[in-house]
Image (cartoon, rainbow, N blue to C red):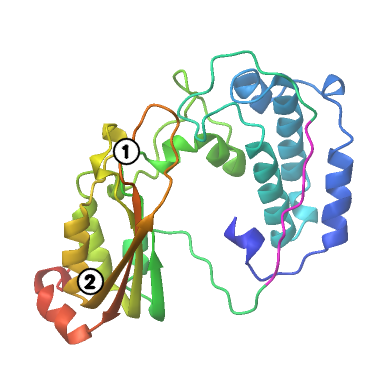
Amino acid sequence: MYQAFFGNGEWDEDKVERLIVAFNKLEAKNLRENYFSKNFGGKFFDANTARIVGYIRGRLQAMRSSLTDKEYAVLLASLIYSIDRRANTLGHFDAYIKKDITPQPFEMHMIDAKSYNGVEIYQEDANLLARRLNVDLTYLDPPYNSRQYSRFYHVYENLVKWRRPKLHGTALKPKEENMSDYCRNAAFTAFTDLVSHIKSRYLVVSYNNTYHSKSTSSENKIKLEQLEEVLNKCGNTQVFNHEFKAFNSGKTEFDDHREYLFITEVDDEKRNRSFPAVLRR
């Protein structure tokens, strides 16, 4: 997604648009069943949409050598954003709605992609990356509850990687991978390690107070007080907050839901004194 929206690289916008126009002329009745339609058709997507999406994904893989990295990323991102509007879910893929899906014509739309010079995009463990970077400002928005992103959005992970693994359970998930400590009881330890190693003049951290949620899966793994305490050890910290309507699938209630923004002006000397044991690792 980041490569598609922000990554630098050559790409032909007209070429991408022509491919999307051709994909939008596809008719499901003329296509064979495929991995995507066999697994997700009639469940996460209507059968016709799933058959078209699976065909398009297979074509992109077959055309890979004729596409630049940027073109490939833009087409993949466009496909995902287009099917997101048609997903038979409540916003994630931990389950699908157990009702008949009303078929609708599928149409793929190109995202508003740009190229920017000087952008560097990484895909790795943030706690390891933090040890190598030296920047002016770092914005952090880690997951705070027990919902593992790789499990809740596995359909899109599967579509992007296109390894076509064997799937398990009602939600049709692949074998576990890329599980985050930020969704476990180790979250506070992981966050402390992260902020103690980032070489940055400013830290900007977003947070929401779902720790009073009636759903255990929505409950924060890091408390508000813990976050404020560890950021104060890094330097002078200001806290801003405002009321915010939380996403709600219908089973969880959030009373006085608020979004918080912490802005810390890092004092390296103070931080080094505060985390001597961490910084030795």
Q: Position of residue 240 (x, y in %)?
A: 32, 67
**Residue 252 colored in magenta in the image:** no
Q: Main secondary structure of the magenta part?
A: loop
Q: Residue at x 20, y 64 (%)?
A: 228
Q: Kindly indicate whether the residue at mark 1 contacts the one at mark 2 (C-beta within 8 angstroms).
A: no
Q: Which mark is residue 218?
A: 1
The residue at 42%/59% (across/down) is: 124
Per the image, is 112 magenta? yes
Left or right, 107 with reference to 254: right
Quadrant hosting residue 269: bottom left
Q: Is residue 192 left or right of residue 59?
A: left
Q: Magenta region: which residues? A: 106-115
**Foreground residue, 64 or 10?**
10
Q: Amino acid under label 1?
A: Ser
Q: Is residue 198 left or right of residue 60?
A: left
Q: Return the disc, 2 or 1, that comes first in the chain's sequence.
A: 2
Between disc 2 and disc 1, the foreground one is: 1
The quarter of the image holding the C terminus is: bottom left
Amino acid residing under circle 2: Ser
Query: Residue 96 location, x and y as percent?
Result: 53, 23
Q: Nearer the viewer, residue 129 or 248?
A: 248
Residue drawn at x 39%, y 73% as measured from the top left? 138
On the image, numbered disc 2 is attached to which residue?
196
Report the residue at 76% width, 53% height from top.
65
- Mark 1 packing: few (<14 Cα in 10 Å), some, or many (20+)? some
Location of residue 18 with respect to 122 vertically, above or below: above
Quadrant of the frame with the N terminus: bottom right
Q: Is 75 placed above or below 269 here?
A: above
Q: CA distance from mark 2 to mark 1?
A: 26 Å
